[in-house]
């Protein structure tokens, strides 16, 4: 059963980057996960998506940036 997959929101930037508020919030959420799996975070910008995993220790793994509209 999936309780919580991750976090997503939008930024009014062409190429979005997470703010310090985002990173702090993601780390709290990731550390609170009981299954130990990383949090999946997604920011939708005007042209790009920012997608990354964050572990409970705060370790980040930024995934490929993808242009919005390309598949
Ligand atoms: Zn943000």
Image: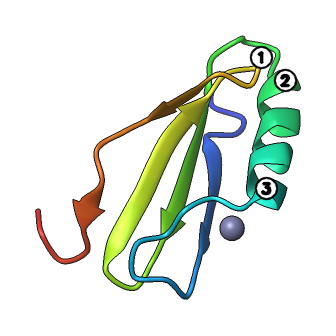
Spatial CA span between label 1 and label 3: 16 Å
Picture coordinates of residue 38 (x, y %)?
62, 23
Residue under label 2: 31
**What residue lies at 63% left-to-right and 17% top-to-bottom?**
37
Picture coordinates of residue 42 (x, y %)?
52, 56
Q: Secondary structure at mark 2?
A: helix
Spatial CA span between label 2 and label 3: 16 Å
Q: Would you place residue 58 above or below residue 45 in this image?
A: above
Outermost residue toward the left in this view: 71
Residue under label 3: 20
Q: Nearer the viewer, residue 33 or 25?
A: 25
Picture coordinates of residue 10 (x, y %)?
58, 77
Q: Which quadrant holds residue 59? A: top right
Spatial CA span between label 2 and label 1: 7 Å
Using residue 43 as the reference point, say whether residue 51 is left or right of it. left
Residue under label 1: 57
């Amino acid at each position: 059963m999936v309780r919580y997959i991750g976090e997503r929101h939008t930024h009014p930037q062409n190429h979005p980057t997470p703010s310090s508020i985002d990173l702090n919030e993601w780390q709290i959420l990731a550390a609170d996960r009981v299954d130990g799996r990383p949090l999946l975070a997604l920011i939708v910008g005007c042209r790009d998506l920012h997608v990354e995993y964050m572990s409970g220790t705060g370790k980040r793994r930024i995934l490929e940036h993808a242009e919005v509209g390309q598949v």
